[in-house]
Image (cartoon, rainbow, N blue to C red):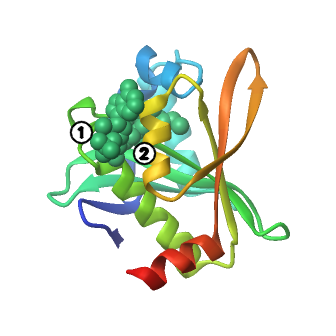
Amino acid sequence: MIIGSQIILREKSLADARDDYAWETDPELAQLDAAPTITVTFSEYSADYASELRHPAPTSHQFAIDTLTSKHIGNCSYYNISETKGEAELGIMIGNRDYWDKGYGADAVATLVNYIFGETNLNRIDLKTLESNTRAQRCFLKCGFTPYGHLVKDGFSFVLMETKRNQWQEQQSKT
Ligand SMILES: CC(C)(COP(=O)(O)OP(=O)(O)OC[C@H]1O[C@@H](n2cnc3c(N)ncnc32)[C@H](O)[C@@H]1OP(=O)(O)O)[C@@H](O)C(=O)NCCC(=O)NCCS
């Protein structure tokens, strides 16, 4: 369990499947993430979910985001972990709209970045977000990510953002 100011990051469990299914079948959320809306039934989804929990991919690490009162509001992860390059990508979704624009996303991202640089040997974290998703960009900017390029993929335009261990260390030394 990793504790932030407003959130707790914890390991995923089968009990999260219901929320995750609701969020992954929500067209607006899928659109904000440039992801396809899933169309499988809940029983198919939960069977795959259980299998992924039993056999997690070695190149990714997922966390549930809970409020300090243990309400599950979203998920975040780092994935495409490359030990040789010392890099990983970061992803986040606050699925519960009641918790948007209240600092939960920024706290989850900052807590995950602290964990990655504090507890692993990775030196760089990057992410991509839709150019149209200005809320997400603002959230990542608040957490020390800086834009470094653009990518057009599958008809979507993304802003690429990154943060590096030395920037994080500099920031840590100021606080
Ligand atoms: C993107 C997301 C993680 C951000 O988390 P959050 O808790 O809502 O964000 P925060 O409150 O930490 O920060 C959002 C900031 O964006 C600002 N904001 C909100 N709407 C905005 C808009 N349309 N344009 C610009 N800034 C906006 C908020 O005012 C806030 O900035 P402030 O703290 O300086 O006032 C969350 O909203 C989410 O998961 N949304 C749905 C899925 C998604 O977009 N995923 C991201 C995929 S990369």
Q: Is residue 117 left or right of residue 7?
A: right
Instruction: Tell me if the residue at label 1 has its CB under 8 Å from ligand 1.
Output: yes
Task: Describe the element under mark 1 as helix, strand or loop.
Answer: helix
Which residue appears farthest toward the front when viewing the image?
Answer: 174
Q: Which residue is mark 2?
A: 139
Q: Is residue 96 left or right of residue 27?
A: left
Judge depth for marks 2 and 1 and give the one in front. Answer: 2
The x, y position of residue 169, in whole percent, is 56, 80
| Quadrant field for ligand 1 | top left
Q: Which residue is mark 1?
A: 99
In the displayed structure, 167 sits above or below 21; it is below
Alpha-carbon neighbours of circle 2 within 10 Å: few (<14), some, or many (≥20)?
some
Which residue appears farthest toward the right when viewing the image?
Answer: 84
Query: Residue at coordinates 49% horizontally, 48% vertically from top-left?
Result: 140
Query: Real-space Cα distance between discs 2 and 1?
Result: 13 Å
Q: Earlier in the sequence, mark 2 or mark 1?
A: 1
Instruction: Tell me if the residue at label 2 has its CB under 8 Å from ligand 1.
Output: yes
